[in-house]
Image: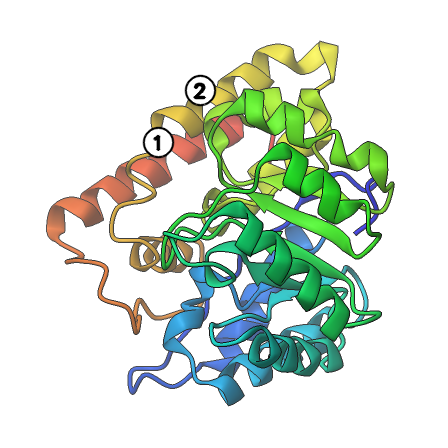
Amino acid sequence: MEQAKKGFIPVMLTPFKSDGGIDYDALTQLTEMYLQAGAAGVFANCLSSEMFELKEDERLQLIRHVIQVVNGAVPVVATGTFGGTVTQQADFIKKVHDTGTAAVIAITSLLADVNEGDEVLNDRVFDLFEQTTGIPLGFYECPVPYKRLLSPQQLIDFVATGRVIYHKDTCLDINQVKQKLAAQDVNPAFGLYDAYMGHAVETLKAGSAGLSCIQGNFFPELIVWLCNNYANEALQHEVNMVQEFLTDNMVVMHNVYPVIAKYYLTRRGLKISTVTRRNVGQFSASVRNQMEDLYSSYTLLQNNIGIL
């Protein structure tokens, strides 16, 4: 997860069988798709993975499986905090670390309740550091159970300890992102990965380590292309086309997610069901038609910018 390796970190889906069990064959195929697209790493056991709907042993087995498929090609990070006391969260972080992850991700909103101030969060983060000595960590401003954003100064202070090498940012504010990027100057091993594609090009040009977005579960090669070409002066017309495409299709890719992402991947030829454990709404005929329109629009964009 070195800062020099700017790129795309996919937030992995979890394929399920019709009976609700994890489909490990489909998980293998999905992981290989991310790698073939050129992902710089993978984020397993995240919100897109339906991590809150998985049992503890399933989380660990899923992470182990992904690490086995990746086989050292890129780093794997995975969530390791699911509530409880700091000690309980630290214990599971250790289990996740033992699977072979490059970093274990802490959910900011599970370290302090919505009515607790930053001082409480800071104390618990430093306590977590003490109870997980030597384990590389990261943060994810996950919107569940509620979105808890880190301030730029908090992130800088945490990174300055040398313990934090990854941050998935969801503030949606480019000015905040630019301030948080100062943390990369504190520790060269640290990287900020932006989740919001409304300012994807701007955040890359500002110096982020890369992108970590749900759009990569529809067309990962497009996000990789953007990470590789955002600063290429000869391709600025195409870069602008990609940014416009991502912005214009923002809403449709969040509707009934992750069902729609799984459906979209079937159109790409993956053998993955649309089964989810989370109730995300109805995959109606109109939503299906929106996905078909998205597939057609992306095919046209591929041809225009030369992505296979």
Residue 240, image x, y percentages: 54, 15
Query: At 73% across and 74% down in the image, what residue appears?
Result: 131
Q: Which mark is drawn over residue 218?
A: none
Q: Is residue 302 above or below residue 101?
A: above
Q: Is residue 186 left or right of residue 250?
A: right
Image quadrant in which the C terminus is located: top right
**Which residue is labeled 2 in the image?**
244
Residue 55, image x, y percentages: 44, 85
Q: Is residue 308 above or below residue 60?
A: above
Of 200 and 19, which appears nearest the observer? 200
**Which residue is labeled 1 in the image?**
249
Query: In the rendered structure, which amino acid carries the disc numbered 1?
Result: Asn
Crowdedness of circle 1 by 10 Å Cα count: few (<14), some, many (20+)? some
Marked residue nearer the N-terminal end (2 or 1): 2
Residue 274, image x, y percentages: 31, 66
Of 48 and 229, which appears nearest the observer? 48
Q: Is residue 187 left or right of residue 204?
A: right
Of 183 and 302, which appears nearest the observer? 183
Q: Judging from the image, what secondary structure is the residue with disc 2 in?
A: helix
Q: Is residue 236 above or below residue 130?
A: above
Between the C-alphas of marks 2 and 1, the distance is 9 Å
Query: At 52% across and 89% down in the image, what residue appears?
Result: 57
Query: In the rendered structure, which amino acid carries the disc numbered 2?
Result: Glu
Q: Judging from the image, what secondary structure is the residue with disc 1 in?
A: loop
**Residue 230 in view, yes or no:** no
Q: Is residue 176 above or below residue 133?
A: above
Crowdedness of circle 2 by 10 Å Cα count: few (<14), some, many (20+)? some
